[in-house]
Image (cartoon, helix red, strand yellow):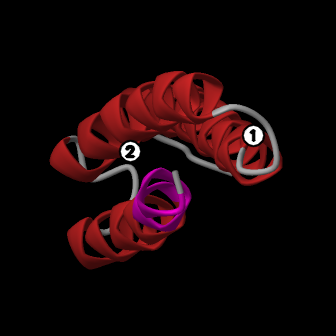
Amino acid sequence: MPHTSSAKKNLRKSEKRRALNRAALRDITLLVKNVRNASEGSAEELQKQFNLASSKIDKAGAKRTMHANKASRLKSQLSKIMNKKTAAK
């Protein structure tokens, strides 16, 4: 347990930040699942879900919530799914 007041404040800050980061990553996981599930539906729905997921992933990578390389890799995987669907038209 922290003893000094600054250490106590840092503990409070880190707990809040951890909660926000975990929530953001949970949202991204849900959006990625939505994209993968939408790949079986219409191309318009897939495009919409991809745009939502891509935006969240970009923000998480920029804020260092998620490592930038992981964000890039995840977007690449999702775009591969989307391109396969649109090319099949």
Check disc 2: other Cα within 10 Å, few if <14, some if 14-19, many if 20+. many
Vertical order, 16 against 76 (above or below) = above
Vertical order, 66 against 19 (above or below) = below
Which residue is drawn at the image coordinates 49% and 36% (left, top)?
A: 53
Find disc 2 in the rendering and name its residue.
Answer: 57
Of the residues under marks 1 and 2, which one precedes in the sequence?
1
Position in image of residue 89 (x %, y %): 52, 51
Q: Is residue 84 magenta?
A: yes
Find disc 1 in the rendering and name its residue.
Answer: 38
Indicate left or right for 39 with 50 as reference.
right
Q: Residue furthest left?
A: 62
| Element on which disc 2 rests | helix
Which residue is drawn at the image coordinates 50% and 22% (left, top)?
A: 48
Which residue is drawn at the image coordinates 22% and 41% (left, top)?
A: 63
Vertical order, 39 against 4 (above or below) = below
Indicate left or right for 61 with 47 as reference.
left
Which residue is drawn at the image coordinates 39% and 58% (left, top)?
A: 66
| Residue nearer the viewer, 54 or 62 | 54
Position in image of residue 83 (x %, y %): 40, 61
Q: Which residues are magenta?
A: 82-88
| Residue kind at label 2, given as amino acid type | Ile
Check disc 1: other Cα within 10 Å, few if <14, some if 14-19, many if 20+. many
Position in image of residue 27 (x %, y %): 66, 33
| Disc 1/disc 2 C-alpha distance (Å) | 18 Å
Indicate left or right for 25 with 84 as reference.
right
Type of secondary structure dominating the magenta stretch: helix
| Element on which disc 1 rests | helix
Residue 7 image-quadrant placement: top left
Of circles 1 and 2, which is in front?
1
| Residue kind at label 1, given as amino acid type | Ala
Q: Residue furthest front?
A: 89
| Residue nearer the viewer, 75 or 42 | 42
